[in-house]
Amino acid sequence: MSPKKPLFISTAIPYVNAKPHLGHALEFVETDIIARYNRLLGKEVFFLSGTDDNASKNVEIAEAAGVPIKEFVSTQAENFKKLLQDLGCENNDFIQTGIEERHIKGAQKLWNLCKKGDIELRKYKGLYCVGCEEFKTDKDIVNNECPLHPGRILQEIEEENYFFKLKNYEKELLDLIESNKLKIVPETRRNEILSFIKGGLNDLSISRSKERVKNWGIPVPNDDTQMMYVWFDALSNYINALGFAENSEKFQKFWENGESIHVVGKDISRFHAVYWPAMLMSAGIKTPDIILVHGFITSGGQKMSKSIGNVIDPYDLINEYGAEAARYILARHVSVFEDSDLTKESIKEYYNAGLANGLGNLVSRIMKMATVFGIKLDKYTKLNVAGPDFSFDESMNSFEINSVMNFIWTRIAYLDGYIQVEEPFKKIKIKPEEAKNNLIFILNELRDIAENLLPFLPNTAKNIIYLIESNKSPETPLFPRKD
RNA sequence: GCCGGUGUAGUUCAAUGGUAGAACGGAGGACUCAUAAGCCUCAAAAAAAGGUUCGAUCCCUUUCACCGGCACCA
């Protein structure tokens, strides 16, 4: 990442249809850690999250519940806002694509700015299932019928839609990604995108008839029969939140002249790495700099699902262990780049080993000695620690959150070992001066570990710093052991 | 089906063309400042078969298993 430029970082905007799940929590925490780390470096950071509201399914659900659609999406958005907050995320803004003027105006501006000829009206022919009220693609169709509605005849319907000529951007997209001007992390995702583009791009339908989307969405400029295809408007949320519509200073600073990172799940990497940059290039707007693609969380080796009964709700974690512990589990024991497995059992083991027995116990034993011996750390010296093959900043800049966490925990283990060997608790009776010096060293190390922890466990880190500065033992254990 | 990736202790991961490392979990021990925590010791691993090589966990081939991608569902 660039050392000085203002940083824009976003989560994807979740679909408000369902409640937040653990994957959302993972994405929020990862994004927040990167944002906090960069703020600590002294950069100006704009961390954005929001919701993707413009799906016609929302209309059906709202109707079924007898609630106006806008009210429905707003209510649902509260769940996501709350999760961000409950996880201690410091997002600067939250955009709701279904109800905000800045989003509507921005999406329409982007549409209008797209190069002449890149968007054109074409006839779209498709097989429509009256039962599902939607178009079916080849893979949905079994024996020439919709498997959900056997016996009904699929109708061939012709409809006019706007198409975006993605094909025009094949070469430019390849250049963009191969040169790493748009960096896709990790490498495997980058390769997937490259081979997808090399396989040839088809033009993309970017609008729907108003009836088909039940009159819900962002209207296509100058055509009252069409609404934007949700992905077209959804992707534009990132710049719309910055005030793209009125070309605000914020947009100039964080987007055009800043550095941008989109944190997304692997299921939507293509939308962000192919469609989105193509749209921006067409409109003559800067493309994003980095797309960080994270994996999914499985449980017991399987996708979480209600029928298997292995779903871990993010609030199970927060309520049982606390937000800081939830952040710990997600940051240390879930891979940033690959799928990872969590079960209730493994979570408890991770919590006890790392937080109760590890960090929490270390703080207790140190602060007990410090208070009983009456030793206060007068001057904290920042340590630029590194392992033999490890650089904190390099690892953070390549988003290796897990490695950084592991490194911090080797420091914790080192301090535990140091206390064991030096035995200041014994020395205090026979060689008080030496014990004192040991403790000052230990306190300084602990203080420095807390500095390392600031992006990951901000409240715990601040609490440890407070305890050291005020020479206090924790009144209750930081992380009580769970049996 | 096509393309790509992975297969290492019970689990999660690491390194390496020449005695395979760690963490968690397990067993044992000495201690006591601490949340019966911490520390020390121990047990424990290369999917299968071929090939290249003086020598392969590492390179190649095949088989098996798992994962991902193969576009307008978000």
Image (cartoon, rainbow, N blue to C red):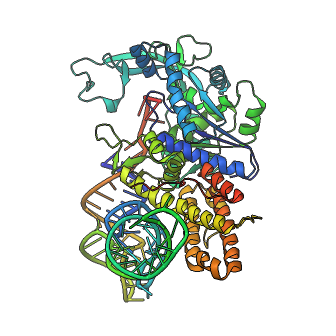
Q: Is residue A140 visible?
A: yes
Residue at position x 58%, y 60% in the image = A404
Residue at position x 62%, y 68% in the image = A369
Q: Please tell me whether residue A245 is drawn above or below residue A432 in the rendered image.
A: above
Q: Nearer the viewer, residue A127 or A430?
A: A430
Q: In the visual, does A378 lie left or right of A339?
A: right
The spot of residue A279 in percent (x, y) is 61, 32
Q: Is residue A175 visible?
A: no
Residue at position x 24%, y 17% in the image = A152
The spot of residue A237 in percent (x, y) is 61, 30
Q: Nearer the viewer, residue A186 or B72?
A: A186
Q: In the visual, does A473 lie left or right of B44?
A: right
Q: Nearer the viewer, residue A288 or A36?
A: A36
Q: Please tell me whether residue B41 is drawn above or below residue A119 in the rendered image.
A: below
Quarter holding residue A146: top left
Image quarter (top left, top right, bottom left or bottom right) of the C terminus of chain A: bottom left
Q: Please tell me whether residue A428 is drawn above or below residue A228 in the rendered image.
A: below
Q: Nearer the viewer, residue B45 or A139?
A: B45
Q: In the visual, does A9 lie left or right of A297?
A: right
The spot of residue A347 in percent (x, y) is 42, 53
Q: Residue placed farthest to the top in the image?
A: A224
Quarter holding residue B46: bottom left
The spot of residue A94 in percent (x, y) is 61, 31
Quarter holding residue A423: bottom right
